[in-house]
Image (cartoon, helix red, strand yellow):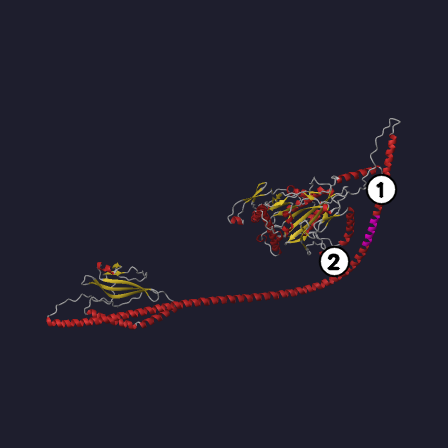
Amino acid sequence: MKPTRGKTPKKPPRRLVNKDKDPVEVYCRLRPPDGDAEVCIDVVNSTTIQLRPPETSHAYRNGHLKENQYTFKFVFPTNTSQKALFDRVSLPLIDDLIHGRNGLLFMYGITGSGKTHTMQGTPGDGGILPRALDVLFNSIGDLQAKKYVFRPDLCNGMDVQTEADAMMERQKRDLLTPLRNPATPATPKSSRKNDLANLVRIPDTTSISNVDDDNNYTVFVSYIEIYNNYIYDLLEELPVDPIMTPKFLYGLPSNVMSMPSKTLREDANHNMYVAGCTEVEVKTTDEAYAVFVKGQRRRRVAHTQLNTESSRSHSVFNIRLVQAPLDPIGEEVYQDKNQICISQLSLVDLAGSERTHRTKNSGDRLREAGNINASLMTLRTCIDMLRENQKNGSSKIVPYRDSKVTHLFKNYFDGEGKVRMIVCVNPRAADYDETIHVMRFSEATQEVQVARATDIKFDIGLTPGRRRAHQMYRKMIEEGSEEDDVAVPSLLISLGPPYPFFEINDPNDNSIQRLIEFLMEREKRRNTLNKELSRLMGNFRTQLLDLESECQTLRDKNSQLQSQTESQNKELVKFQNRLKEKNAQNGMLHRTHQLYEEDRRGLQSELDEKLKLINREKQEKDKLRQALKGVATSEKEKWARECEKRVKAKQLEMQNKIWVKDEKLRQLKEIVCAREAASNRVKERRAAVVHNRSKSPPPKRNPPPVKLRHRRSRSASGTVWIDHKPATTIGTETVMQPSGIKKKKTIKNAKEMKDVKASNYMLTHQEENSQGEIETKLFKGEVFDTRGGGKSVQFTDVEKLRQETPLSAERKSVERKRHASDEENSGEWTDVETRCAVGIQGIAGKGSPALTHIVPQKKFKI
């Protein structure tokens, strides 16, 4: 008789409180170099590598020649096998997964550094993902629950049901599968050379030893990709519309058709998950790997200059292990949802960062590269912010929501679990500039602390070893039923103790009586067991009849569904014929639409060109208007300055003329006054002479010595000259200079003449004319001794040295007219000067030797 299950207190699985934190473990793996390519990375030891900048890098050209060293948890050289990498990095994560702890492992590096190879490997040397599946199923192979005992509740949790309900669900699914998936054309084979599904894989035989055998386990896998910051389910089966979908699209991957994007949600425990993501229950490594291959065919890859099959999205392969304790008798899963433990291992293959000038991307590839780099930059920003908060004790907001990658895995950094990263590096020198950024990010990541996960304990008060005890009881019952030729299915009660040992040595021994009692007791037990067996067989027959009735009902429904399917197929044929006609009409309309669309594009392009031409002409006119406005303003200002300058020059010229006229009038006045005084003196002398003649004869007097004046220049003679140059005299530096004056004595003051013996005198005088130019005048004269012992100078000639700046034709005409007007205005004054000079000469000839005067005779223009 099957014992009833004891009731136990319903307590959820308890986690041990642990406030310890561990840093993010970062490993480095070097890809083997391509042929004889130049390398820029050297392995110093098992934890350190050294980067030296090559001559082609930007750092070398900018003068940064320092060799940098970077430290990791462990460095895997180029000859490392996938097995050695898995045992050191991933095997502890599988152990944590079985013991209820979460784990995150992601590949990071630039494009073409070997991330996908590290994740998948080759058939002969599998990568991290297939080896993880092998070790997991090797460890829980006989401890797995029946299929559909655990079911996803669509809220990141799990529901549990009995094995009988699970069997019914399996039968229903087996019956409904042909109806849900009608026959479709065969799926075309992938065009990729290395189709993973057609290769023979070598499994890994490693297993975890310390697995709790009192629990039942079930594995669920899911596969998603993050493309252009949108989440897509690579395992989602899109419903195929037989009417709207053409036959040539049947069986193609879902990314050929439109895949809907998924959203991120938060469950009751504040964990992030992908809503509506397909989770497949798998029982073996081959099933799980087949699911991975199916999703891998749908993943987006493309050819670039740096990688023939470059991943254009971030892929996440989730392995969820569901475990729950067995019931008190160790036969089925304990029927309590609160006693279910779910642990998860996420294997992330991040798309590589790349630079556009190296990959030569354009169009969609350029947009994909921009989104990839943006998401990786957000990951770096979150890591830096976490490190700063933990280092400084600040509480800055970490921008997880800026990218789907960081938002999905925020639980690992803010919650608890183990996070590991494998940095894949290509040591070739051409990738130095990108590799140096990867190294800096890996250094920052190692400083982030993550809470250490703890084991799960099911505190329900059940005895350990229930599964093993139940198996031993079943084995004993099967052996006992074989000996007694009684078919007792799954009974936990035997016929009693084994036969005792009897030996009769005395006739009065009661051994026979004890044997009779033992046999009678054994017969009672047999009868009880037969009654229980008959009851169980009756119950079993009743259940079997119920199942047969349900099966018959399902068969009837199946026949009805088949008849409905046949009618629907007939209608489908009609609809397909109509669809062909509509497709033909649609093709004609599509071609017509294309023609009209081409005409519209042509007209639109012409219109755009016209608009561009109009805008260009308008801009040119605006520029010309602005230029003319600027020219007019500059010319106006120029002419204003020129007019102001000319007005000032004219004013200065008129002032000079007025000064000259005033000076000439003053000289004329002095001449007239001197003449009147001379005439008065003459009259007085004549009167005195007449008076003296009347008294006595006058004495004879000698006339003063007066030299005759010459009308020509005496500069060519060989006499001695006194060159009187004031200290303020400026050198003219002209080509034509006064010549012929060989003997001269230069003085700066007139008082120095008394010590110099010379017969000629030359005075240099400079002044600024009306045009602002320096005009030099040389006043020449003869020197003679006076009766008082001094020296007197009689000026005989004036030479003018004038420099003129070359003028334009227009200005020359203006200057010529101005000089003509000046000559006309000065004509009268010339006549007056001449007359005055003649008058003065007459006075001097008659006996005024002390009067010094200037007689202009020659003028030289240079």
Q: Is any part of residue 310 visible from this angle?
A: no
Residue that numbered label 1 is attached to: 533
The kind of residue tagged 1 is Leu
The vertical placement of 694 against 715, above or below, is: below
Nearer to us in this view, 48 or 590: 48
In the image, residue 555 lies in the stretch drawn in magenta: yes
Q: Is any part of residue 132 visible from this angle?
A: yes
Nearer to us in this view, 766 or 813: 766
In the image, residue 88 lies in the stretch drawn in magenta: no
For label 1, the crowd category at 10 Å Cα-Cα, with few meaning under 14, some 14 to 19 and many 20 or more, is some
Residue 468, x across and y down, in percent: 75, 39
Q: In the figure, is residue 705 to the left or right of 159?
A: left
Q: Residue at x 35, y 70 (%)?
A: 816
Q: Residue furthest top?
A: 506
Instruction: Please report the bounds of the magenta region as a residue range.
Output: 544-557
Q: In the figure, is residue 843 to the left or right of 439?
A: left
Quadrant where the image shows the N terminus: top right
For label 2, the crowd category at 10 Å Cα-Cα, with few meaning under 14, some 14 to 19 and many 20 or more, is few
Determine which quarter of the picture holds residue 850: bottom left
Nearer to us in this view, 795 or 126: 795
The kind of residue tagged 2 is Pro
